[in-house]
Amino acid sequence: MQYLNNYIDGNYADPIADDWLDLYNPSNGDVYGKLAKSKKEDVENAYKAAAVAFPSWSNTSIDERSRILLKVAELIEKNLDRLAEAESMDNGKPLSLAKAVDIPRASSNFRFFGNAITQFASEAHESVGMNTMNFTLRQPIGVVGCISPWNLPLYLFTWKVAPAIAAGNCVVAKPSEVTPLTAFLLGEILTEAGLPKGVLNIVQGVGPETGQAIVEHPNIKAISFTGGTKTGEHLARTAAPMFKKLSLELGGKNPNLIFADCNYDKLIDTTVRSSFANQGQICLCGSRIFVERSLYSKFKSDFVAKVSALKIGDPSKADTNIGALVSKEHLEKVQSYIALAETEGDTILCGGKRITVEGLENGYYLEPTIIEVTSNSCKLNQEEIFGPVVTIMPFDTEDEVIAMANDVKYGLSSTLWTSNVNRTMRVSKKLEAGIVWVNTWLNRDLRTPFGGVKQSGVGREGGFEALKFFTEAKNVCISY
Ligand code: NAD
């Protein structure tokens, strides 16, 4: 039995209370380990280590910080196989996906911010005619908190902690209790890379206890959070009266707008991916598919055929397209939405059933599911399911599809398929979303701003946006 404890002040340490949570392998339903259920006191210890490390780390030269971040990136790459296997086992995602996407991206996050910090400069404003010079000092905030979800565990954990430490902060970070393994393993890599003790502390535990203690801590001055909208709302309520800086990356219900003039072959293959990659458990997956009526019946039959051919099964096998859902609770939640299709009078075009995989009978496998709906106002189109379930419906006009795309409380990403440049410009401007992908999906340049509008979040990550979030801007105004 593996025990996953905390990484505080550069050392692995058991939690103060002898309290542990069972960890499940979603591919077979077995308990594979125990997770530290850290209390307020553990968070306090992590905070103290971070506070002690801060004066030195915030004054460490940019070159040195950059060198250490690049070293972490290199070591993640060196440990690719081990980390990918751990991620796949912990999350249920295909090993091939963890190897091609999750772990390389975790490495890229450190490499990107290790380089970006060397290009992050102060602005100066000469107030001409007033004998005044202004410059902006961008100073690290101090000790900050980073809290991440289970769907892309190391990918999203490092997306937060890398810019935080690059900017000179010290961090108390908590990965999801559902998938804590790769963040736990990261501790070894941080030590090997020579990151000074206390700069990045990884505290394990459940959200309402450990996460809550981080958010409530009076001296943790900023919180970068990725997770569900309900949790984000609760976090905001806790942190706002303390005037903490907050970055919230929340849920989505992303539309795909497919026009008949698109590149069809590219569209169909990409849409299979954007619907079902990572079992549909990516906040950026397109879960509402709107197709121009003249293309609708062709798209429907080709899409159903391609999705029905996807191979569901053992995440560790090379030919598996769809692995296990992350947990029994999540599987049941997704199934409850599929059951709604019947009561709402919708049509399940394919999938919908739990699958038993030979030798892995207790794993959480679900067929990728396409549901034809008649209205965008149904629950299946309005609520985030976050699993291998998409809806499809036809539309007639550009205005109609824009209205449906925007008629939802979320606004994270959207995908537009057309080869008409004028339409691209018109529709992109009108979509209420933080990202509009045109003729592509999950195409990420890490310099671009990342985040959502409406109930998909507040603030932007990525590039200099993240470095701005993790620094305080101070105006120095000099009269001469
Ligand atoms: P979640 O909100 O349940 O948990 C996210 C993290 O918050 C976990 O580490 C959890 O332990 C912690 N947490 C829970 N309660 C807390 C509390 N009271 N105080 C502090 N921390 C607390 O989300 P999840 O189920 O892990 O992830 C799925 C959700 O994340 C989906 O809604 C998905 O859309 C969203 N998501 C958004 C993005 C994005 O970039 N916008 C990316 C990935 C996932």
Image (cartoon, rainbow, N blue to C red):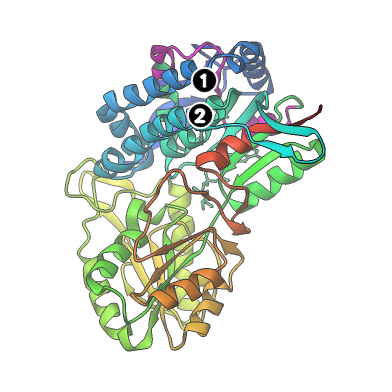
Residue appearing at x 58%, y 69% in the figure = 408
Q: Position of residue 138 (x, y in %)?
A: 66, 30
Which residues lie in the magenta part?
Answer: 189-217
- Give neighbour class at mark 2: few <14, some 14-19, many 20+ (Cα, 10 Å): many
Ligand 1 shows up in the quarter that is top right
For this orientation, the residue located farthest to the left is 319
The answer to whether residue 380 is seen in the rendering is: no
Q: Is residue 309 magenta?
A: no
Q: Residue 473 occupies which quadrant of the picture? A: top right
> Who comes first in sequence, dot 2 or dot 1?
1
- The amino acid sitting under disc 1 is Ile
List x then y, in percent, for residue 278. 35, 51
Please give the residue where the numbered disc 2 appears in the rendered image.
117
In which quadrant is the N terminus drawn?
A: top left
- Asked if the residue under mark 1 is in contact with the one under mark 2, i.e. CB atoms within 8 Å, the reply is yes
**Is residue 131 found left or right of 276 in the rendered image?**
right
